[in-house]
Image: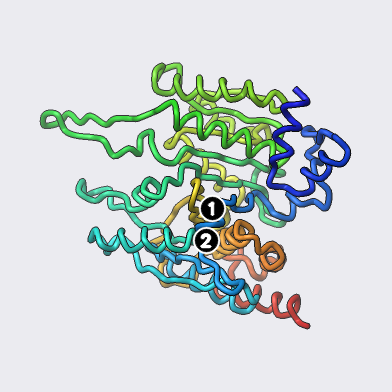
Amino acid sequence: MAASVIQRLLSSKCTHIRLNVLKYGQVPNFQTGVACSANCHRRRTYVSDATDIQSANCAKYGGRHTVSLLTGDGVGPELLDHVQTVFKYAGAPIDFEKVVINASTREPEDLKNALMSVRRNGVAIKGNIETKFDDPTFSSMNVALRIDLNLFASVVWCKSFPGVKTKHKDLDIILIRENTEGEYSNLEHENVPGVVESLKIITEPKSTRIARYAFKYAVEHGRKKVTAIHKANIMKLGDGLFLECCRAVAKDYPEIEFSDMIIDNASMQMVSRPQQFDVLVLPNLYGNILSNIGAGLVGGAGMVPGMNVGEQYAIFELGTRNSGRSLEGKNLANPIGMLLASCDMLNYLGHHNIAAIIRKSTMSVLSDEKTCTIDIGGHAKTSDVTQAIIDDLKYKTRT
């Protein structure tokens, strides 16, 4: 067991872990999460650095990265405007390539342009694109982006925020969702009038891939436990295959505790005793549901960042993928989640110091009731929050 653990640590992206193993042959204590010195995982939050393959796809010129900015619907464009303003004052080495894509840009060329931009730049930050559910011909562009770019893992971190009043305290849950199949396969048809068949696709390669991603993530981030969420008691073949793949991968990671839970029980446990969860690995639809529940537990749709990661590309956005159309143009939307997503993007690109500065200013402003938006009990406008962050950044970046 120790040999296999050390072998994985030697290939870790974390320099501190790698050096400790090489110098001293020490196996980190996964129960306490003190695997590396200098608090490197805490500093880099829940985001791993881009791999060599991912980095090779990122556009970088003269020390500056170019990032695709996909506008989305609702409050997406205005929140992304605030991100650009904060980056400007913080001196973030990022140039944005703006791509207008929303529910109104339905031509194939619009999606093609967005895909081309992300492939060119390697990374994007995105507002949610609304999907009209009352039009059967309207396909989700969010799903198309994830499938065409093979962004197989959605990662959402639901962690309690200091100063934000919620029912449950001390939450720290990572939700890892398979992003490219399941109920989102877009395979449905009407056999005869009034009878619709909708296919849920579960495959061994993709289930194994997301399970291995979850366990590897747990090891690299000092996590203790992975729980697979399923409905294998009813969908014995589809969800049964997903659970079987998770169990098989778990055998390769004996240092990580593994359990499984049925989705209906997991939903109840999330709202009654969420502290029991550490890392959750889920098929597509269940991941969507529990990510939204988790976001609600720590403050709401505007608070939680999320990322979609593949072998080559990554897209950062709000964890709930909520367009917030009812708040559009009212200067009421909470900018915290999108700003934290932008910090995650900076960490992914290796700009850890500037990410830490922006994150610290954001959290500092969040802790002040005078600069909290209405969704978390305050009275501040979106622009008030952004200006407070900029003022704090000016102080921190003053030379």
Q: Residue furthest bottom?
A: 399
What is the number of the mark on residue 207? none
Percent coordinates x, y for residue 51 in the rendering: 59, 50
- Picture layout, residue 328 above or below residue 244: below
Q: How many marks?
A: 2
Q: Few, some or many C-alpha atoms within 10 Å of disc 1 (few <14, some 14-19, many ≥20)?
A: some
Q: Residue furthest right?
A: 24
- Residue 248 lies left or right of residue 231; in this view the side is right
Q: CA distance from mark 1 to mark 2?
A: 7 Å
In the rendered image, which residue does mark 2 sit on? 58
Percent coordinates x, y for residue 59 in the rendering: 51, 65
- Residue 87 lies left or right of residue 363; in this view the side is left
Where disc 2 sits, the SS reads: loop
Q: Nearer the viewer, residue 194 or 71?
A: 71
**Circles 1 and 2: CB distance less than 8 Å?**
yes
Q: How is the image coloured?
A: rainbow
> What's the residue at 80%, 51% (across, down)?
39
- Picture layout, residue 305 above or below residue 210: below
- Picture layout, residue 101 above or below residue 37: below
Say what amino acid the circle numbered 1 marks: Gln
> What's the residue at 65%, 75% (across, down)?
90
Question: Which quarter of the figure is the C terminus placed in?
Answer: bottom right
Where disc 1 sits, the SS reads: helix
> What's the residue at 29%, 30% (across, down)?
199
In the rendered image, which residue does mark 1 sit on? 54
Question: Which quarter of the figure is the N terminus placed in?
Answer: top right
Percent coordinates x, y for residue 205 in the rendering: 45, 29
Q: Few, some or many C-alpha atoms within 10 Å of disc 2 (few <14, some 14-19, many ≥20)?
A: many
